[in-house]
Amino acid sequence: MQTAEHQYGYFQDLERSTKSGLIAYLFILTIGLAISIVGVEKGFYLITNIKLCESLFLSLLTINILQLLIRGINRIQWLGNVHIFLDKTFFKFLFRSNEIILRELLKLLEPHERPVLDKLAADERDAIARSIFARLADDQSIFESLLKRGIFNSWIWYWITIYGGMVFIILTICSFSKSLLIPTVYTRIFSESIGIVAVLHVLLIFILGYNLILVTKRIMREITDLYDTEILSLLRSYITKS
């Protein structure tokens, strides 16, 4: 059975994983932008004809960039707001997941009770869904079930992939602009390669997002079957407040 300390440590690990993924993609963004600005040909020539002093300089520069990224990202306390904003703006899988949670929960109410929550604004419904799900996750047995399903890890991979998608979309725009300004074989191949990676990331985002929706639906049906009394109590408390 997971204790509160173990749960806290587990979520800390998840947060570190998210930050590590963001750092890796920001590093890729930095290198990609540098190559786009300097030029693919010059970058290729530098790599193939690099000297010892230049390699040492580049190694130190790389280490310094990584250290700056690590320090900067680790100080961010509002990282969750960033990927929630990105999802809300472009993909909306978190919103759909919360809607599924609330819809499954509302099935437990009597027909005359449902309109009270149905009339709430989308943000209020979203807040209720997240609040109830968080309260349910405090139950040790439910938390263990969620761990076995891997729902938390799935969300982390989804957030990391969103960061990757945004990074490669930015790199695609920059590299494509460079290929228009300096139309060479190298710039064209570079921009096309980056574009393909960006498309793959976007496809992966949708795959992970739809998988999260399916998993959330299955989990909520299991939870509502096992904990209908507790959930009804929570829902009716929100109805009373409304």
Image (spheres, helix red, strand yellow):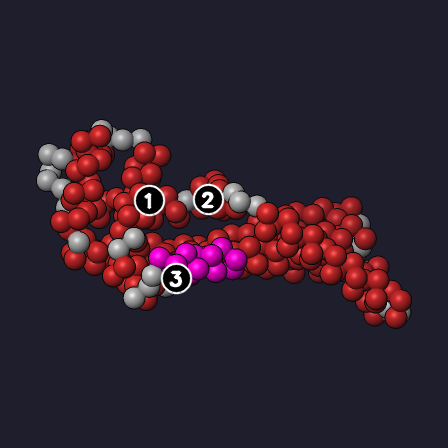
Q: Magenta stretch: residue 12 in it?
A: yes
Q: Which residue is mark 1?
A: 130
Q: Are marks 3 and 1 in contact (CB under 8 Å)?
A: no
Mark 2 or mark 3, which is nearer the start of the sequence?
A: 3
Q: Nearer the viewer, residue 27 or 171?
A: 27
Q: x%, y% of residue 198? A: 58, 55
Q: CA gap, disc 3 to disc 1?
A: 22 Å
Helix, strand or loop at disc 3? Answer: helix
Question: Residue at point 80% right, 55% down?
Answer: 39
Q: Nearer the viewer, residue 201 or 186?
A: 201
In the displayed structure, would residue 217 be above or below residue 117? below
In the displayed structure, would residue 79 be above or below residue 191? above
Q: Residues within 10 Å of mark 3 (few under 14, many from 20)?
A: few
Q: Residues within 10 Å of mark 1 (few under 14, many from 20)?
A: some
Q: Nearer the viewer, mark 2 or mark 1?
A: 1
Question: Residue at point 84% right, 62% down?
Answer: 57
Q: Which residue is mark 2?
A: 84
Q: Which residue is mark 3?
A: 6
Q: x%, y% of residue 132? A: 27, 45
Question: Residue at point 28% right, 48% down?
Answer: 135
Mark 1 or mark 3, which is nearer the start of the sequence?
A: 3
Magenta range: 4-17
Question: For residue 111, which quarter of the picture?
Answer: top left
Magenta stretch prevailing secondary structure: helix
